[in-house]
Image (tube, grey):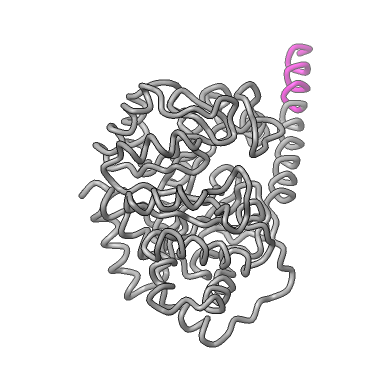
Amino acid sequence: MKKWIILGTLAAALVGTFIVLDVIARRVAQRLNTVSRTTPYTPTKRGAALHSELFIADLHADPLMWNRDLNERSSRGHTDVPRLLEGNVGLQVFSVVTKTPKNMNTERNDDTTDDIQLLALAQRWPPGTWFSLKARALYQAEKLVESAEDSDGKLVLIRSREDLERLVTEREKDRGRVGALLSLEGMHALEGRLDAVDELHAAGFRMLGFAHFFDNEVSGSAHGVKKEGLTELGRAVVKRMEERGITLDLAHASRKTIQEVLAIATRPIVVSHTGVKGTCDNNRNLSDEQLRAIARNGGVVGIGYWSTATCGKDAKAIARAIRHAVSVAGIEHVGLGSDYDGAVGVPFDTAGLVELTDALIAQGFGEGELRKIAGENVLRVLRANLPAR
């Protein structure tokens, strides 16, 4: 009897600890993923009418990192299926974060600390994810699949060109669905193995980012210690990704990595979420030289919404960054990359995207240009990269 009392006490203590950790994780998510607008936004008539006709594609958001039901409208964070539909988003790229360093910054980080491990423990992720980065990626992929299965057809997984074309056609008749494409933020999750690309492909990943905030076995990060370029494994990864129909994402990549990937890539790449030095000069953002190189590749740069990307806290700052990127790279090579739910503050959540449409109209963009920025450029790249079926 004494043994069972002790075990019961330990179990109760463990449950209590997990409850406390979950509460802490929720508070952290709420503190980090803020929205600066506190009052309702009233769009212009022109902006609202045009926004309702756009196919909008967002190249980067991180809600899979947090324990939220994507099919429920939340008052926390930036994005979920109900708010994506309210914002008229046609395609959302859901990125998977597997490791971030303590005291993360844009200048210099090593790989010796792991805040996502703490988040996995706090949010009661499966034990296999506590020590394996690839397991964390596969777990979050499963979360997206389950969300799609439970969405009553509102969230549609995109794994092929056939899936994409079906989504585009169906949305012309019914805006009550949004496409979901799975992405990885940083190839440390490959755990140094080329065949992990095949495992991620089988799990539904159709975009992989080379680096996040630290250097890895594949490439250097713009925020790492050495900031070097592609390794031998990295060159093999580029080839394998193109063979599998996986889009190359150079967000967070070092300058040398960007140069070396563009030199060997045979398909258009993306920089899923970034700013531009022309309006916000810091180590996180792309130079004009890099913008031109990406344009020559046929790729697309997704302009982010947070202050490090834009040096501002409103839709006007995002629109200014987009205007500069277009003036340098050309209208065919600029898109949207919010970084929603990526531990950033933003001017509006995804339900309020019409605010950005108004800001872009105020920047002088015409309807045809807006359609390209909103999503047509991203569709072009995905059509060039995705496997046929």
Residue 48 in percent (x, y) is at 52, 81
In percent of the image, x 53 and y 54: which residue is there?
70
In percent of the image, x 75 and y 30: which residue is there?
17
Q: Is residue 213 magenta?
A: no
Occupied quadrant, residue 363: bottom right
Q: Return the residue nearer the eye: 19 or 199.
A: 199
Q: Return the residue nearer the eye: 9 or 193.
A: 193
Occupied quadrant, residue 15: top right
In this picture, residue 308 sits left or right of residue 254: right
Residue 72 in percent (x, y) is at 57, 58
Q: Is residue 152 visible?
A: no
In this picture, residue 260 sits left or right of residue 252: left
In the image, residue 252 sits, relative to residue 4, either above or below, namely below
Q: Is residue 4 magenta?
A: yes
Occupied quadrant, residue 330: bottom left
Q: Residue furthest front?
A: 289
SS assignment for the magenta stretch, majority = helix
Q: Quadrant of the N terminus?
A: top right
Q: Return the residue nearer the eye: 298 or 152.
A: 298
Q: Residue furthest left?
A: 388
| Span highlighted in magenta in the image | 1-12
